[in-house]
Amino acid sequence: MTVTITAYTDEYCQAVADLFTQAVHAIDDELYSKEQKAAWAPLDIDYSRWQQRLKTKHCFLALADKQLIGFIELAADYIDCFYIAPEQQGKAVGQALYQHVESIAREQKLAGLRVDASLVAKDFFVKQGFAVVSHNQLVRLGIRLQNISMYKGFYS
């Protein structure tokens, strides 16, 4: 399978929103409960909200035969959303997307990258050289969720 990394275009809005929802709901219930996943990624997807969101982000897509298999959003030095289709996880799709974004950050001479990683994504970011900054509690739709603020500096 050949993976192509490309800039987001509007034709992929629904696919991005669907992939986000599928990826969140595929997370093991021992990491995030069904209730937490429903608050994080409601099953009644608001595509117009996604369309507005994606217009304001620098989003990059991982495509295989024009099929969306992952995406990542970069806002200045912050990785906002980063999701891979459940059936593609562990197949280096995330690595390709992350390397693309890191190369952009380095070209822009950013000092580093920040992310608020889910519990499931923490190990991926550690392998990329990120360090834990803090453990966070946030509330979404009245439900408490946990994530981890992480940072990777490029220069000493």
Image (cartoon, helix red, strand yellow):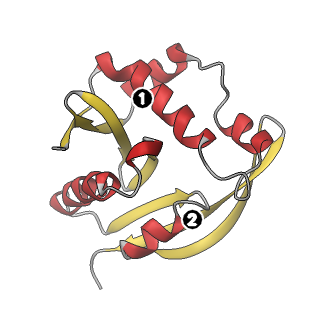
The residue drawn where x is 69% and y is 62% is 136
Residue 16 is marked as: 1
The part of the image, by quadrant, that contains residue 87 is top left
Q: Amino acid at mark 1?
A: Val
Q: Is residue 39 left or right of 121 when viewed as pictured? A: right
Using the image as rendered, state which of residue 83 and residue 60 is in the foreground: 83
Residue that numbered label 2 is attached to: 149
Using the image as rendered, state which of residue 78 and residue 34 is in the foreground: 34
The residue drawn where x is 38% and y is 35% is 57
The part of the image, by quadrant, that contains residue 143 is top right
Secondary structure beneath disc 1? helix
Look at the image and tell me in which quarter the C terminus lies: bottom left
Q: Amino acid at mark 2?
A: Ser
- Relative image position of residue 142 (x, y in whole percent): 84, 38
Q: How many marks?
A: 2
- Is residue 97 shown above or below 17? below
The part of the image, by quadrant, that contains residue 95 is bottom left
- Relative image position of residue 105 (x, y in whole percent): 25, 58
What's the CA distance linking mark 1 and mark 2?
Answer: 24 Å
Residue 83 is marked as: none
Q: Is residue 70 left or right of 110 when viewed as pictured? A: right
Mark 1 vs mark 2: which is more N-terminal? 1
Q: Is residue 110 left or right of 85 when viewed as pictured? A: left
